[in-house]
Amino acid sequence: MTRRAPSWLRAELFGALCLGATACGTDRALTGVWQQVCEGDASACTDAAFVYKLHLGRFGDDLTGLVARYAKSGPAASFDTLRECGCYLVTSGSARALTTRFQIEPGMPSALGCPAVGHAFSAPGCEDAIANPPCQAVQFELDGESDTLVGTMKCDDAPPVTVRFEPVNERLRRTCVGACRNAPDTGSSE
Amino acid sequence: MNAPRALWALTVVVVTLSAALVSAAPAPDAARILAPPPEGFKRPTVLVYPLVDMAPLAEVAPAIVSTPAAQSNVPAFDAFVSALSRYPNLRVVTPSSVVSRIKARRTWLEGVRVGAARADEGRDASAQVRLEDATRALADAARVLHEVEHAYVDPRAVARTELARASTLLEQGNALEANEAFVAALSTDARTRLRPEYDRAETIAALERARLGLLTAPRAPERFTRWPASESAAADVFIVRARHHAAQGGEPARLELVVVSANGTLVPETQPLPAGVPAEEAGGRLASRLFACLPFGGAAPVRRATREVRADVGGAGFVFLENPLDPFGHVGAAVHLTTQIAKRVSIETMAMVSNSIADSSAQITESMVTLRGAIAPGFETRLGGARLEAHVGLEVASPGAFVTSSNVYCRHFGVPTDGLGYQACVDGGGLDRTPRRVLVGAYASLGASLDLPEDLYLVARLNYAEYLFASGSSDLGRPLGGALSLGYQLR
């Protein structure tokens, strides 16, 4: 775990002058929580069974984080924690210029950070979705940086569908433990 | 021991002791007074002004003499100056040097110019019978000339100005003020007279009345006992002014003298000059009495440099130019103490604590707290309300542990140390850890400060260091940064 200076010290120090102008421009854009938007022309939402929330961390050209999946109950997206149905590690992430690429692998033996299949999520149909994942891998290719991420989401070899994400002011999740109820975060390897 | 032998030994002891006592005896007072002062002795300065000879006051038609004002015709006064100058503990400035000193003042030349111009204006106005303008201009002229002590340089010119003023006042019918102006003219130059063939009879009579009145009841003008406005005040400077009075009504001639100090202390002295007493003796006695009332002097005060201490606190930041990653910033707080040890020399002492901010690729996984301290002598100069300073010295720095990782999972999720977390952060997180170390090197800073009210100041500094020694391997160096601080000037 990254060690941090005490909060009072950080507050003092960041309140001080930032004279190292070149060092102040750390490339952390994209880092944060992005929530899928279903309004407008977002075909992925209309017929899809799931919507996604991205908890991304960008480090220069590298990208990682977690993607939380939520089961839909109607045409609108719902990000109620009770409807959470999968939490996956972002792999193969990259962020160059304004294009961001990454994938998640729901077909892996278990979602990273979660216990065995079907034990965690109680949303209707979720156990089945985890036991028989509709995609082995979901690939995202998104454009944008600050206000909106717009691009495509592709399930295995299926044709890509358009998706749109907007930032939400939420705490960035760095673990799936909260989603995996009644079970310790035993972790899993890639 | 037999008796003769004991007597002999006793004699030897007595003689030896006597010789020792004689050699150890203190020198006589006179010898001590006249001995040259030791090195570094601070001598009081005595400005002996030219003698104002009032003796011609007694003459109805004194001869006009052309001797310089600084040169007296009174041998006793010359003897007095000579005797006073022989005291080695005093720095006596002779009358001629005092005149040079007066003429060397910047105010003198301007005062004479203005005074002469106003006197001319007054005389012109008087000729045109604009008496009010004339008296005003002549009064201005006399005041200015007295202020710059021109009466000791050219007493006759100043007296003629006073005389013109007196004549104009008399024409105005102001007999009282006219008499004071006549007295002022005579007190400045006792040879001042009017000419019957040119001047009005009533004016001549008024001057004569003033002369006789002054002769009967001598009185010194106020400026005689006043510290001159054009002379800077100093505690160890004394002014001696003297007037010579002729024998009158059975009283012998005399020297009237006053010692004026900047703090207003007055010491009057009078030395009779009876006939038959040598001038040297009279002058010597007067000098002796004056010597007794003047301070002896003493060790020169140790010149202490103004030890001004300035303390400021503010924000600071820097970048290690020598750095394995892209340059990343360190921001923190800095305290500077600057001690001025001479007029333009000071020592800067700096202490700084800073924390790293994220590098552009966020490879640093732990905040790096860096401590820096420096001591650097240098120069500074003031430009109005601002100050520029430059210091070069020694810096000791201690950058904190420098921990980086190239593994994006470790950077985002952290290194799993408790059995929980994501095993994607593998191989120890790909961490590269350089422990805290100590660096020593040369330090340089440039600063500019701006004075604020209440002894506060705002200062901006640029600093740079070149490390020459490291306690271990170090890939950080050449910090370049700056600080903006608010300070208080202690005295």
Image: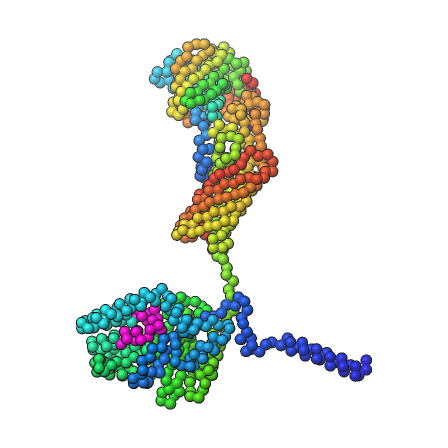
From the viewer's perspective, is residue B78 above or below residue B441? below
Residue B354 visible in the displayed image: yes
Left or right of A71 on screen, residue A5: right
| Front residue of this view, candidates B160 and B412 | B160
- Classified by dominant secondary structure, the portion drawn in magenta counts as helix
**Left or right, B112 with reference to B355:** left
Question: How many marks do you count on the picture?
Answer: 0
Q: In this orientation, does residue A127 appear?
A: no
- Which x, y percent locates residue A159? 41, 10
Query: In the image as oriented, which residue stretches furthest toward the bottom?
Result: B250
Q: Nearer the viewer, residue A134 or B242?
A: B242
Q: Position of residue B166 (x, y in %)?
A: 25, 76
Residue that appears at 36% across and 73% down: B152
Find out whether residue B348 is within the magenta segment.
no
Q: Residue at x 37, y 86 (%)?
A: B247
- Span highlighted in magenta in the image: B143-163
Residue nearest the observer in this picture, A182 or B280: B280
Q: Residue at x 48, y 57 (%)?
A: B306
Image location (x, y in percent) of residue B487: 45, 48
Magenta-span inclusion, residue B156:
yes
* Residue lying at the far front of the rendered structure: B66
Quadrant for the C terminus of chain A, please: top right
Residue in the image at 39% along x and 19% along y: A150
Q: Position of residue A169 (x, y in %)?
A: 42, 27
Identify the image's colour scheme: rainbow, by chain, secondary structure or one colour: rainbow
A97 up-or-down from B335: above or below: above
The front one of B227 and B38 is B38
In-image side of B375 versus A51 (left or right): right
Rendered-image quadrant of the N terminus of chain A: top right
Q: Where is B158 relative to A124, above or below?
A: below
* Rendered position, A146 above or below B113: above
